[in-house]
Image (tube, grey):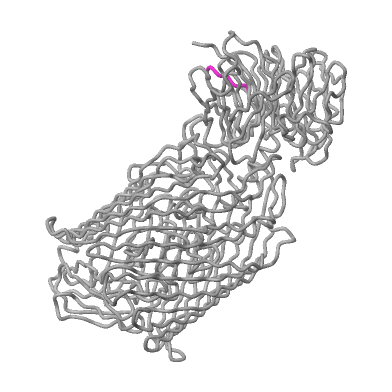
């Protein structure tokens, strides 16, 4: 089992995982077509699977394999349809949660696909960091219908309306940030880049729209440099409004609660809590939220009942857990998930 | 592929024509007798054709020759003091010389110490957990590499990355680095990974392969945790043999061997092979379907061997040396192919063995060495950075052994010491890596038997104390084997322990982006390897005199601190220790009909190899099919040899969870062979078809197989 050192694959996998990990793009985008059973979807990176469970019955988990190979680190869901880019396996897995069917849609060779977002029921945008492009994927025809050049190392996607916000990490060949990150804004009507937003932080990795309508971008920074930050972007004017530093070592994911608090996860310190309205920490990285005592969080999500879920990566060889806390931040559920959970999202699945 | 049908067809038609034209006169039997474990020639063995007065003794080179035999089915017995006797059935054809390679299993504990249980006609295959492949079988197999020879054997799993890529062997669900591969006694494992790529050993170099399943550290020291593969390189050939092969994937090879005796018995051989290797394959599910072209899949290979034997210092001195050079493309997984990754390997190997027998005692000494240089480079990979890694490794070993047969209940006592030195230089290793290591092993063994009669209970005990040259710890391993026979049944119980130290790469790999070594890694250990088995063998009088054989071997051999590369919470990959549960069984059944010569055999392997996690020990380790097996038949009508082997690989998981399973599959290989004489030469055309039904499944996802492969070989050698 020792690694064949001379082979590129394990290294490539490590790189793909490490760099794409920042792209924990666990958003539910667009308007859900129908109300239904709120369902959590967890992406497990090492066993290339999803763990799916109704938020009101978290013990009723279901495991869904995505592919024999891949390094998924992000997920987007719309109704019963879930899309998961497969990293070094150049495809996006599309799962119908209602039927359990899994299919894959091919992406350009060597895409290293990470981020994904829906603009409607049929079209998803997938970031190809190795190629510097975004693929437009038609879920109905199961084809990648267009490829849009966007710049250096696009690794996450956020969507609102017909705008796609692509987070360019601007990494060099050694996978270190070469310069501050960029956001490319794409008009989905014409599949053309409208604008470029220059960020102040390094290595933008995840983004979420806040209750104020602004786009909050987590900049992971350079590994080992503890220089994570948060950019606040005005999505219509397409400018960075604020840049907040002090988010410590390699923050990777973000989720908002109903009160407008942003929960930012990190492998190094757990979860930082940021008050978006006051532009200040509720719990900074040096006094983090430790869900059930865990100082490691590989991903965060908040369901419609305002309950926070923190993913515990574990040893990335054995199955691990997601821990849910209530509004008082007391843990109320420990949910078994797969190996190395890395991203979580929520969606409404129509009950037959 | 169509063009390849013509030469095989022509060859086979020639064979048919020749067989009808052959004159009617007596045949001859010639061959070679070797020690099954050491590979050394066995001198003075009595070769008797049962039911006749004809017999011969093997000479100093292990060779024998009997003339004037009536054609037909013959039983030939091989006996020598100190060895289990053996009976072989042969079909002697009109006017032809049949060549037979025989390996005798030693009765006392011998240099490499395999005990052979059973009745007087028991062969090495009857020993528990042993697979023996001799030169004759190698030639019949049509396989090109050592890995090909081991595919489909009970308890063995060859993990191959494409038809021409690296191929390693797993024994009873082990990792590849838990199997010690010795080439003429010298460890062959990659110093960085600890595993051995068996695809780099061409069959033209191999005299015999012996696989010992289960913990073997008490015999062979560190690394033989799950088993040992003992490869003996060519030692001797017939006076002249030439082979030409062609086939699918633009496969071309040529082999020439010769031997002589100038007071010093010598043999010499060479081999060239090239494969273009390009083929179309189905793209993996999810990658838009259709087919793609597998490129950068070529291989070129050259190999030489030389051997000599002569009396020296009152004993026998054996020398052998070999050289292999290989260059090939490394196309990578189909979902992330590269057209520029290459491997270059060159390897020198040599062995000098001296043995002196005096009465009931034997003293032997062996020096061995392997010098190899491997370079892996990809100037333009599809992902990550270009790399160019070179590793030079020199392995030297010395082994001294003494044994005696005191008599009475104490059948044998042996002991000795082994010194192994390894020196490395690698651009893939960190500057802090030591340049080498020296390991010392002291070993002793004894055999106690109840009565001097076949079937009486026998106990073999072995102990070995090894000093690890890196961590400077002493480790003690043991083996106890109790066997007994009654009627047609032989039973055995074996208990052993073993260990395998971390590979250099595990501890000193040059740290890269998101990858780091682990200097604190512990050695893998199997503290308790328990196997229990039985062999039933006998003649079924009611079924055309068929001989039936059934062997079952079960084992429990959990691994403590198995080394697995995995990412940590930061997604930095490094080797870590994990416990693994390992248990299973192997069953082999064979039915042999003497007239007509027809054999059918089947094997089944159950390998339950699971991560030992708190509260859950059900998840199978990746790429370890829990179920696998073979069904084969061999028929020899009128001088033909027709063999078919079907192989089953069960469901396996590519991830450490019971999900994303890969479907089971079957493959079917077919071989046809026919020898005929023309003038003073014997010609043997053979046709081999792998994956007859064009099955392109692969054990490991992303490494496509080309489907049906056809090879045609023509062998020629002068009649003696």
- In the rendered image, residue A139 lying in the magenta stretch gets the answer yes
Judged left or right of residue B559, residue B115 is: left
Relative height, residue B530 to residue B719 (above, below)? above
Residue lying farthest to the bottom in this orientation: B314
Q: How would you classify the magenta stretch by its main secondary structure?
A: strand
Residue A313, located in which quarter of the rendered image? top right
Residue A257 locus on image (x, y percent): 74, 17
Q: Is residue B347 left or right of A243 when viewed as pictured?
A: left
Q: Does B374 sit above or below residue A210?
A: below
Q: Nearer the viewer, residue B375 or B134?
A: B134
Query: Which residue occupies the foreground of this view, A148 or B564?
Result: B564
Q: Position of residue B72 (x, y in %)?
A: 15, 68
Note whether residue A39 is visible: yes
Determine whether A89 is above or below B113 in the image. above
Q: In which quarter of the view is residue A78 placed? A: top right
Total count of labels: 0
Residue A111 can be seen, yes or no = no
Left or right for B75, reference B377? left
At which x and y percent is residue B592? 21, 58
Place of residue A25 in the rendered image (x, y in percent of width and height, measured from the top left)? 69, 25
Q: Quadrant of residue B61?
A: bottom left
Q: Residue furthest top?
A: A34
**Quadrant holding the C terminus of chain B:** bottom left
- State which region is magenta: A136-140
Magenta run includes residue B375:
no
Look at 87% across and 26% down and name the residue there: A244
- Determine whether B25 is above or below B201 in the image: below
Q: Nearer the viewer, residue B368 or B716?
A: B368
């Amino acid at each position: 089992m020792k690694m064949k050192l001379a082979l590129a694959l394990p290294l490539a996998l490590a790189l793909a995982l490490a760099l794409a990990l920042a792209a924990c793009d666990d958003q539910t985008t667009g308007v859900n077509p129908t109300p239904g059973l709120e369902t959590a979807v967890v992406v497990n990176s090492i066993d290339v699977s999803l763990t799916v469970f109704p938020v009101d019955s978290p013990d009723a988990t279901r495991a869904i394999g995505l592919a024999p190979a891949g390094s998924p680190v992000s997920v987007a869901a719309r109704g019963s349809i879930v899309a998961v880019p497969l990293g070094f396996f150049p495809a996006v897995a599309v799962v119908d949660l209602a039927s359990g069917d899994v299919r894959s849609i091919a992406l350009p060779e060597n895409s290293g696909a990470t981020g994904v977002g829906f603009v409607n029921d049929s079209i998803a945008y997938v970031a190809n960091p190795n190629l510097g492009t975004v693929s437009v994927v038609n879920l109905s025809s199961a084809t990648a219908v267009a490829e849009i050049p966007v710049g250096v190392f696009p690794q996450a996607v956020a969507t609102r309306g017909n705008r796609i916000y692509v987070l360019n990490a601007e990494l060099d060949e050694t996978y270190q940030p070469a310069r501050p990150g960029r956001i490319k804004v794409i008009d989905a009507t014409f599949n053309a880049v409208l604008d470029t937003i220059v960020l102040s932080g390094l290595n933008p990795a995840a983004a979420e729209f806040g209750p104020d309508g602004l786009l909050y971008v987590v900049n992971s920074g350079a590994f080992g440099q503890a220089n994570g930050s948060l950019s606040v972007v005005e999505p219509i004017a397409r400018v960075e409004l604020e840049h907040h530093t002090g988010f410590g070592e390699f923050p990777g994911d973000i989720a908002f609660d109903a009160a407008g608090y942003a929960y930012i996860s990190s492998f190094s310190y757990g979860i930082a809590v940021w008050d978006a309205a006051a532009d200040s920490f509720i719990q900074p990285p040096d006094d983090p939220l430790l869900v059930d005592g865990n100082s490691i969080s590989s991903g965060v999500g908040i369901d419609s009942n305002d309950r926070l879920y923190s993913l515990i990566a574990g040893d990335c060889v054995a199955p691990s857990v997601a821990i849910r806390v209530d509004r008082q931040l007391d843990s109320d559920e420990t949910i078994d998930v797969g190996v190395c959970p890395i991203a979580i999202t929520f969606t409404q699945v129509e009950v037959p | 592929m169509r063009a390849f049908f013509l030469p095989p067809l022509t060859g086979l038609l020639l064979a048919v024509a020749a067989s009808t034209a052959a004159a009617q006169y007596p045949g001859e039997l010639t061959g070679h007798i070797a020690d099954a474990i050491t590979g050394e020639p066995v001198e003075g063995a009595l070769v008797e054709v049962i039911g006749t007065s004809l017999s011969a003794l093997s000479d100093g080179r292990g060779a024998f020759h009997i003339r004037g035999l009536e054609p037909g089915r013959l039983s030939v017995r091989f006996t020598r003091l100190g060895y289990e006797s053996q009976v072989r059935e042969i079909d002697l054809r009109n006017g032809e010389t049949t060549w037979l390679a025989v390996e005798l299993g030693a009765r006392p504990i011998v240099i490499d110490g395999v005990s052979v249980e059973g009745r007087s006609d028991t062969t090495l295959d009857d020993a528990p957990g042993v697979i023996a492949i001799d030169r004759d079988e190698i030639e019949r197999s049509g396989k090109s590499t050592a890995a090909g020879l081991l595919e489909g054997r009970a308890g063995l799993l060859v993990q191959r990355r494409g038809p021409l890529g690296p191929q390693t062997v797993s024994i009873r669900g082990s990792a590849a680095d838990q199997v010690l591969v010795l080439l003429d006694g010298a460890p062959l494992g990659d110093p960085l990974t600890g595993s051995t790529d068996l695809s780099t050993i061409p069959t033209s170099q191999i005299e015999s392969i012996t696989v010992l399943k289960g913990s073997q550290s008490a015999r062979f020291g560190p690394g033989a945790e799950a088993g040992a593969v003992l490869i003996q390189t060519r030692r001797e050939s017939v006076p002249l043999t030439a082979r030409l092969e062609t086939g699918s994937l633009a496969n071309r090879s040529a082999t020439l061997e010769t031997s002589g005796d100038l007071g010093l018995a010598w043999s010499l051989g060479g081999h060239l092979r090239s494969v273009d290797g390009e083929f179309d394959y189905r793209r993996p599910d999810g990658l838009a379907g259709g087919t793609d072209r597998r490129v950068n899949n070529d291989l070129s290979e050259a190999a030489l061997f030389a051997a000599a034997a002569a009396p020296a210092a009152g004993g026998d001195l054996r020398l052998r040396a070999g050289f292999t050079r290989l260059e090939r493309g490394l196309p990578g997984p189909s979902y992330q192919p590269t057209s520029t990754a290459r491997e270059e390997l060159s390897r020198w190997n040599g062995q000098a063995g001296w043995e002196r027998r005096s009465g009931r005692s034997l003293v032997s000494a062996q020096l061995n060495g392997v010098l190899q240089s491997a370079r892996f480079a990809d100037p333009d990979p599809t992902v990550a950075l270009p790399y160019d890694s070179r590793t030079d490794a020199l392995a030297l070993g010395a082994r001294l052994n003494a044994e005696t047969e005191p008599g009475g209940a104490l059948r044998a006592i042996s002991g000795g010491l082994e010194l192994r030195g390894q020196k490395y230089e690698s651009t893939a290793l960190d500057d802090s890596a030591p340049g080498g290591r020296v390991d010392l092993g002291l070993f002793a063994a004894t055999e106690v038997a109840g009565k001097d009669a076949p079937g009486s209970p026998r106990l073999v005990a072995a102990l070995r104390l090894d000093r690890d040259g890196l961590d400077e710890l002493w480790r003690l391993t043991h083996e106890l084997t109790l066997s007994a026979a009654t009627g047609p049944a032989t039973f055995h119980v074996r208990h052993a322990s073993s260990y395998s130290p971390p590979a250099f790469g595990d501890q000193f790999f040059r740290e890269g982006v998101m990858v780091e070594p682990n200097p604190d890694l512990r050695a893998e250990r199997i503290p308790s390897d328990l196997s229990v088995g039985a062999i039933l063998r006998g003649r079924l009088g009611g079924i055309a005199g068929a001989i039936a054989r059934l062997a079952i071997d079960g084992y429990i051999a959990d691994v403590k601190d198995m080394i697995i590369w995995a990412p940590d919470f930061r997604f930095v990959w490094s080797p870590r220790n994990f416990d693994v549960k390992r248990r299973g069984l192997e069953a082999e059944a064979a039915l042999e009909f003497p007239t007509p010569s027809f054999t059918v055999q089947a094997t089944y392997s159950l390998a339950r190899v699971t991560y030992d996690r708190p509260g859950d020990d059900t998840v199978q380790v990746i790429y370890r099919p829990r179920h696998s097996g073979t069904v084969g038949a061999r028929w020899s009508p009128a001088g033909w040899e027709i063999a078919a082997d079907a192989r089953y690989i069960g469901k396996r998981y590519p991830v450490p969870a019971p999900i994303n399973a890969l479907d089971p599959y079957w493959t079917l290989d077919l071989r046809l062979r026919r020898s005929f004489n023309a003038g003073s030469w014997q010609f043997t055309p053979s046709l081999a078809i792998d994956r007859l039904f064009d099955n392109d499944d692969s054990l490991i996802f992303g490494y496509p197989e080309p489907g049906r492969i056809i090879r045609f070989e023509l062998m020629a050698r002068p009649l003696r």
